[in-house]
Every structure is written in C-alpha cells, then in structure tokens.
Amino acid sequence: MTLTRAASAFLLLWLTAFLMSCGSEHNTIVVGSKNFSEQALLGEILAQHIEARTHLPVTRRFYLAGSYICQQALLAGRIDTYVEYTGTALTAILHDPIEKDPSAVFGRVKSEYQQRFRLDVLPSLGFNNTFAIVIRGEDARRLNLKSMSDAASHAPQWRAGFGYEFMERPDGYEGLARIYGLRFAEPPRILDLGLLYRALLENQVDLVAGNSTDGLLSARDLVILADDKHYFPPYEAVPIVRRETETRHPEVRAAIAELGGKISDEEMRKMNFAVDGQHRDAADVAREFLHAKGLD
Amino acid sequence: MSPIQFFLRHHQEILQATLEHIWLVGLTMFFAIAIGVPLGILVTRKPWLSKPILGGANIAETIPSLALFGFLLPVPWLGGRADRLAIAALTLYALLPIIRNTSAGITGVDRAVREAARGMGMTDRQILFQVELPLSFSTMLAGIRIATVLTIGIATIAAAVGAGGLGEFIFRGLAMVNDQLILAGAIPAALLALGADFVLGVLERRLRPVR
Amino acid sequence: MTPRTPSESDRKPAIEFRHVHYTLSNRELLNDVSFSVARGETLVLLGRSGAGKTTALKMINRLLVPTSGEVLVEGKLTTEWDPIALRRKIGYVIQDIGLFPHYTVTQNISLIPRLERWPADRVLERVKEMLETVGLHGKTFEHRYPHQLSGGQRQRVGVARALAADPDILLMDEPFGALDPMTRGEMQNEFKALERHLGKTVVIVTHDVGEALVLGTRIGLMEAGKLACLYSPHDFVHATDPMAAAYMAQLRVYDEAKGEK
C-alpha cells in the first residue's frame, strides 16, 4: 500500500465520521434535566406533555450534572429544553448580581437569555424552589411562630443544623444571621443534606435550612418560617427552550407554555415525596399529576 | 432489561453520542497534528527548543484531565462553549506523543542517508519532505495512534464539563446508579479506542520502511 | 560517455587548498593544509583515522568551511559558491553509501537529475546507462529496493547515483571500506578502469595503502591534520620519508603473510 493511498483512505474515514456527526435528528425533541429527583420529575412532566400534545417523539436526557452542563447542552443543541431556576440562571449562568424581586429577576433572565444565547425563557411553572428555614410543627404552634422575624428571639435557645454549602455561600447562613439578627447558643452544626430533616425530627437540632419543595415537608409535621424580610432570592422554576426548536416546532412551545403556573409549592413537595420518600417511579408520578390536572 | 435490549432500545441516542464523541476526537486530532508535527520538525531543526517545547507538552500531559478542564473554564472565549474548552484541553493532551514521535522519527533517520542527501545538494526543505518525513512516517503514525487512543479515553471525561459524547452516559449512569447507562457509554468508548488502535496500527505497520 | 579531451581551462586546477585551517571545539583538525588537484587527476588522501582526511574532503563540497584559509573549486571560493549548486556539480560517495531505503534503485540513481528537472525520458535513459556503467546489468535491478541488494551491489548503486548528473568532480570517502576484501579488490579494479574512461577529477579518502596505490595518480599522506607529503604512486613506493616508508612496510608484511613476493 503506497503512502498516498494509505493517507487518503485514512482521511476518507475521518471525513465520513465527521459528516455523519454533523447531521442531526430533526424531529425528535430532547428534554434534559439536572441530577436530582425534582428535576427528573419536571423533565418527565415536560416530556410527557409534549408527547401528548404534539405527538412528536421525545428523548429524555436526564441526570445531567448541573446548570453549566445543561446550559452547554442547550447551546450545542444536544437538548432542546430543560427547567432551570431563575436565581440560579441569574448568578450561575449570567454571572449577574442577585436580586430579590421575583419579577425583576425573571425579566432580567428572560431578556438576557434571549439576547446572549437566543434561548427562550417561558413563564414559571408555578413554584419557587428557594431556601426554606424549617422548624418542628410543635415548636411553631407552641411559640406561635410564623415568620423568621418571629423566631429570631428564640434563636439563643436553639441549635441550628445546616448543609456545608449553605454555611459557605455568601447568600447563605452569614447573610441570614445578619438580616434577622440570629444568635444561636452554639455555632450551627454542619450536617449531610440527607440527614438534616432526620436530625430535626429527632430533636438533635431545632432549626435547619432545606429547600422549599423538599418532599418531607409535606409528609411530616414541619413548618417553613416565612422569609418576611425577603432575604432569599427567588428560584422560580422556568422552562428554557432553544429558539431554533421553537421555530421548527412552534407546537412544542405551546405545549410547554400550557404548563405555566400549574404546579404549586405543595404539589411539587408531594411529588418529590412520592419519588424520594416512597421510592416511586418519576414517570408514573408525573403521569398521575398530568392526569389529575386534566392535561393529558 | 438486558444490556443488549437496552442497546437496541436506545441505539439512536447511543449512535448520536458516539458521533459526538468522534467529532470531539476528530477535531482534536486535526489540531494536535497541525500543531504537533510542525513543532516536532522545529525541535529537530533547533535543538535548543527541545527542552521548552517537550517540557511544556509534558507539563500539559501531567495535569489531571479533569483539573485541566476546570482550569480552562474561566478563560473567556474557551469557557463559554464546553466543546471548545474540551477540544482545547484535549489538544494539549494529544500534543506530547505527536511532537515526541515526530522529532524522534526524524532524528532516527540513518545518518548516512542524511549525509548523502546533504552532500548531493538537496536543500533542507527537500531533505525534510523527500527523505526525513517519508522515512519517519511510521514513527509519526505511532505517535498519532497513541494520541488518538488517549484522546478517545479522556474525551469521556469531557462530559463532566458539558461537552457531551459518550462520557455523558457514564456520568448520568453514575448519578442514577444505572449500570446500563454506564455501559452504554463505556462499551462504545472502549470499542472506539480499540478500533482506532487497530486501524492505525495496521497503517503503521504497512508504512514501516524496510531497512 | 566519451573521454574528455584536454583544453585551455584544464590547466587551471580543479580544486585548490590554500593554507587551510579547521578548528572545532578547540581541536585543530586541519593545520595549514595546501595542495591542488589538477583536472582529470585522482588524488588519494591516505592516513589513519583522525588524520583529517575526511575533514579535508568535506571542505570541497562545502559540508564544512575552513576556519581560516581558502578552498577553491573551479577557481571560485567555496564560500562564494551557492552550496546547493556546488554540491550538485560534485558526485559524493560515502562509506555507508546512504541509499534512500524508501526509493528504488532507479529512484535513488535519478535523484539529482530529477531535482535538476531533466525531462523524464532522458532521466530513464541515464539510469540505464549508469547501471551498465557500474556493472549492474539487466532489468532486474531497476525496481529493487536497497534492502534487496548485497553490499557490493549497493556500493555500485551509490557510485551510479554520484555519477548520474555527470559531475566534473567526484568525492569518495572510504568508498569500499564497508566491503569484504574480495569484493573490495574487485571494486577497486573496476573503478580504476572506469576512472580512466570517465576522465573526471576524483578525490578519494582511504586508510588502505593498497587501494591508494591502485587508484591514485597522486597520493597525499595526511597525519594529525597536516599534509605530510604528496607523491605519485611510483615515488611513494620508493620514498625515503619515514611515514611513507612505514606504510610500505605494512604493505610488505601483508604481502609476505599472503605468501607473495
């Protein structure tokens, strides 16, 4: 085999592979999600609803490891849509400073995503997965506590438990303690996220920081203290869609938009509990939800 | 579901991811060869450059791949698109074997051949293209083969920073504790690497000059 | 090829060394070397390893340049010549030959003609001519690769390659050194005949005194970077110079061992 024959065969092989990879599947809609159960649920809801309404084939690409990965996948066209949280989009993707007003945050995210990435941000699905400061139900009733300001005076008698990230974030414990004037008897205990609620329920700690849509919150006697000073930023769940996908399939946008405002905080909690607490299949839980809402 | 059934069911996605992977590797090898071969030639022409160039490539090779991806994330033009970032990092990794083998191949050419060529009145360029490069093609190809197999492997890690490819199946499978997803990424990647090694190895042997 | 007839320009020396010194890393490899080579003559530089003979040879085709002193080829300083043009006019044969392993015999021999852009048919004709000249008869050799040839055959191809572009000057550095004594003897005799026929100016480097006597029209004895003496073969044999005498003594020992004389 001569040199030139070998070289040209080699080149041809690469070229073929190249060209093959350039072409893409135009009709399938790919729904992505991050790597925790709430995201898988939301992904399923989106996917099933798109299937039902548009009859287009939908591929699921769930458990992508985080916002950056999902954003890259959107930009590269490997996924057509996924659900992001407005606060995360603002700080982690756009690198803008955090704001507290939900509609300002949404507006900012929508316009910048359109301008910088040609991505469409659809209206919120209806819930806000922000941080939640949680105490036991009995304490809330006994001391008549409804908001963080109410509870601040009791802090010296309490032990707090937080996850490592919440302790480290500048918009985590540090700011919270400052805004509400919290002074605990001892420094807060740092606990594994999975153990926070158990520690609370077993009276090892008296106050924890969780997420407002955590499943256990709907299944146990736990109360979320209202963030009356609006310390925590909004993390509204918004579907993000590629403009190109919308142009090729406007019915996809219509289908996703139909889901706007349909999921309340409590409904999300219940679904999360079904998957995390009761170990049910996310696809089944999603299907039941859509059926119950008359969306199938 | 057995692994085979899983593969059949999701063959479309697996093929798509494989093509993404090939695209990442292909582009990387293109840049690595385009940069590495001239650098390898340069090292033979100006031996004092051998330390900085080979040294630099060696350092790039030593940095753990995930760390290198992480380093490049904040870099303005690169960090914005994960595939650019991945290809930049992967190219740095692929450089060392290519530079090293190119220069070794050229310096390994028989001294008598080189002296005869020079003494007969061939210009440096003629010697490079008509004598040195053809005679070192096999060694260069060995370097390219090593670099290709290396790149196919490290490209699976690129999924950790969002570049897609077969690694994505592996990471998703790990997060979901789903063996089949992991295999859906790992097996095609391994086959790609073996295939590339085999094909390039055959080519390398065919091109080896008989002494 | 027809032998050349002498002309006016033939009286100018083809090669001249004028007080050439060459120093490398503080070692003086050539020390005030001066000689000239007339057109058509064969100068053999004889001496042991490290005497500076190869260094001197490489000055002629400008593979090396003197630290001081001048080397002239065809009346022009080597430093004034374009090195590539100079080398293409000089045939160069080295001990290890250096045939390109990835070229056939034909491609090897036709290297310079092709670089000089001779028309294709003239190139092919010339290759055939050269193969005949060096005694590689028949079509069998044209498409063989160097690794398919014996040592002697490779050496012949090396000579053919050097002569292909019909250079006026031929440089040979221990050309038969890598061959076994039988083949070496054969090659020396064949080359002697060829030499006379070609009429080129030849400079040969060797450490073999027998070879020097067979091939040279003059013998230059070199020792430690200096040209000790310059003799015709006849004068060399009868020389009283101690170094020349020492070489001849070696030869006699050899002859006696062979049972001759």
Image (cartoon, coloured by chain):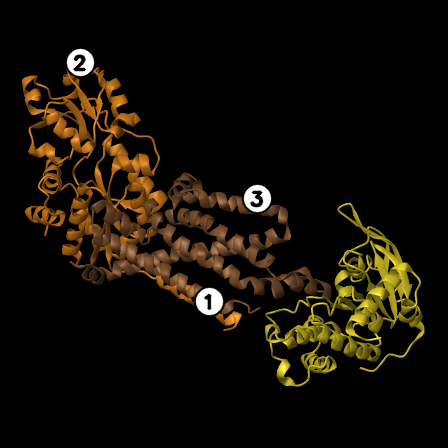
Secondary structure beneath label 1: helix
Quadrant of the rendered structure where residue A40 is?
top left
Secondary structure beneath label 3: helix
Report whether residue A232 is seen.
Answer: yes
Q: Is residue B71 above or below residue C198?
A: above
Determine which residue is flagged by label 1.
B203
Q: How many marks?
A: 3
Label 3, label 1: how many angstroms apart (C-alpha)?
31 Å
Which percent across, then down, holds residue C15?
A: 86, 64
Determine which residue is flagged by label 3.
B52
Chain B colour is: brown
Q: Are marks 2 and 3 on the same chain?
A: no
Query: Residue A287 versus residue B96: which sits nearer the camera?
Result: B96
Q: Amino acid at mark 2?
A: Pro
Depth check, mark 2 against mark 3: the one in front is 3
Quadrant of the rendered structure where residue C153 is?
bottom right
Residues packed near mark 3 inside 10 Å, few (<14), some (14 to 19) or many (20 plus): few
In the drawing, does residue C50 fall left or right of residue A278?
right
Q: Earlier in the sequence, mark 3 or mark 1?
A: 3
Q: Which chain contains the residue that carries disc 2?
A: A
